Amino acid sequence: MKRYPIKGDRRYTISREFCGYADARFVVRFCGDWIGQSQFYSSAVVMAVGEKARRSGALIITAIEK
């Protein structure tokens, strides 16, 4: 498991933490601020990459509920 999932950007971190579940989860943080958590490391990496894209100004597409 890599602590810094995004190459060249050490502001994003993933670590195993207890956060209200029976088992430790992979917690994603940006500069120490909570982004989210996941049971799986690969999902945490996707969360970190998505957050980096959002902060970089990427076009965010969301579903419109009717």
Image (spheres, grey):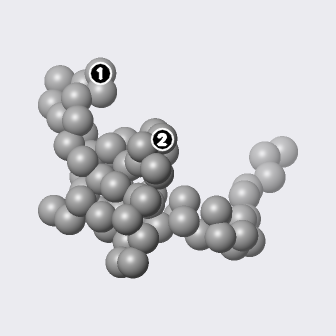
Q: Are marks 2 and 1 in contact (CB under 8 Å)?
A: no
Q: Secondary structure at mark 1?
A: loop
Horizontal placement of 31 versus 64: left or right?
left
Which of the labelled discs sits on residue 59, or is there none? none
Q: Is residue 32 visible?
A: yes
Task: Quote the CA–CA distance across marks 2 and 1.
Answer: 17 Å
With respect to residue 62, does 6 lie above or below? below
Q: Amino acid at mark 1?
A: Gly
10 or 61: nearer the eye?
Answer: 10
Residue pointed to by mark 1:
20
Image side of residue 58 versus residue 10, left or right: right
Quarter of the picture containing the C terminus is top right
| SS for dot 2 | strand
Report x, y in % for residue 64. 80, 52
Residue named by callout 2: 33
Residue sitting at 32 percent across and 67 percent down? 5
Tell me the mark number nearer the camera, choosing from 2 and 1: 2
Task: Kindly indicate the quadrant of the structure image that contains residue 43.
Answer: bottom left
Mark 2 or mark 1: whose residue is earlier in sequence? 1
